[in-house]
Image (cartoon, rainbow, N blue to C red):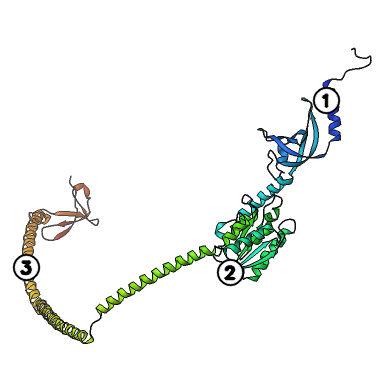
Amino acid sequence: MTIPPGIKPLTVSQITQKIKSIVESYFEDIWVEGEISNLRVPISGHYYFTLKDEFSQIKAVLFRSQIRYLSFEPADGLHVICRGRVTLYEQKGEYQIVVDYMEPTGAGAILIAFEKLKEKLFKEGLFDPAKKKSIPRIPRKVGIITSPSGAALRDILKVLKRRFYGLHIVIYPATVQGEKAPQEIIDGIRIFNLLGDVEVIVIARGGGSWEDLQAFNDEELARSIHGSRIPVISAVGHEMDYTIADFVADLRAPTPSAAAEMIVKSRDELKSILDSFEKRMRNSMMRYYELCRVRLSSIERRIVHPARRIWEIRLKIDELVERLINASKRLLSMKIASLNSRDFLLMSASPKKLISSLKRELQHSETRLRSSINSVLKAKRDCFNILTEKLDGLSPLNVLKRGYSITWLLPEMKIVRDSSDTRKGDSVRVRLWRGDIICKVEDVKE
């Protein structure tokens, strides 16, 4: 077959571009509901996944810039509602949804809300085991909050009647499913706390779907359970069902029937416990009686007749008096010996004796001092005479004695050693051996 005249074939790119233009303009802003599958997160950080329902599927992408706005973690099998736009990937000719917003729906949304509330209350300490109140071993009055027409109440009453017939039970009727259920259960807790005589509260409900148990995942109900002064037992659903109320309650029972068994023990168990207590009490009393008997016998052996006791005391007094006399004598002897010793020491240290001794020592010292002074004076005198003789030998006066003289030029008193030191008419002073003469120079000869 040949191409008709005037027909120009379109390229694959042209067709793809036209389809892209039509699709993107028509599906510019859409909401799509489906289940996530084939979720993958490459190194780029974008979320690539497939949205599918019972009959079809479509590829989708959630870019990293939009991930921070999510309030949950996407996962395979999660049912979600997405808002975005349809675009065509030209290179492969495939269309996909570019997701701008995504939120979970159905059971997935409930599970996410449950986990968020659970984490919040856990951080606040509402699950702390240390804050949980203990359940009375044998409560006298039990409060039950549940539906009066439900199987849970019948199971609890049946077990209580079988285990402990005649127990005082107060029932607060409340719906355990739907929007009104949390507030009615809260009212029941408040009423029991106001009454004050209820010793334990049981919140009960039979099994059901995850959605049916949502009343027990209410935050206000959790805080009411935590704030109750009366211990609270949570008996909601089957053994595998867990709710926020189970984590906050002081005790979690896997089923309503199990809660009844936890509240009270059976009559046989109580009778066994009482028998055990009675036996232990009897044994304790017998042991105490035997102990008292032994102590009494010991006391009887220690008790003596008063006359004998007085005689023993007299002997003891006589012995003490004798010991006192002997001790007094020994003490007196010791004091006398000490006094004599101190008297001898005092006489030895008498001032008269000391003065006599000091006088003798002073006289001896004086004699030695005089002798030393005389010896020193004689030595000094001999040394002086020797020095005097030496000084006389060197004295110029001895020279003058031999006929020499000393001449001074007046008035300067300058010693004349050379005739040139004087001139005719100068006055001179001449020292002789005895006396001085004043002369006038008549003539100078070299």
Determine the CA span between mark 3 and mark 2.
120 Å
**Mark 2 or mark 1, earlier in chain:** 1
Numbered badge on residue 368: 3
Residue that label 1 marks: 16
Distance from disc 2 to disc 1, alpha carbons, whole Å, reads: 80 Å
Judge depth for marks 1 and 3 and give the one in front.
1
Instruction: Indicate which disc residue 327 carries.
Output: none
Can residue 231 be seen here?
A: no
Q: In x, y percent, where is residue 424?
A: 22, 51
- N-term mark: 3 or 2: 2
Q: Residues within 10 Å of mark 2 (few under 14, many from 20)?
A: some
Secondary structure beneath label 2: loop
Residue placed under numbered mark 2 in the picture: 140
Any part of residue 10 in sight:
yes
Q: Nearer the viewer, residue 394 or 141?
A: 141
- Gap between marks 1 and 3 measured at Cα: 148 Å
In-image side of 239 versus 356 (left or right): right
- Kind of residue at disc 3: Arg
Name the spot of residue 414 as percent of width and height, x first. Answer: 22, 53
Front disc: 3 or 2: 2
Return the disc, 1 or 3, that comes first in the chain's sequence.
1
Q: Position of residue 47 (x, y in %)?
A: 70, 36
What's under tag 2, amino acid-wise?
A: Arg
Q: Quadrant of the N terminus?
A: top right
Q: Is residue 133 left or right of residue 346?
A: right
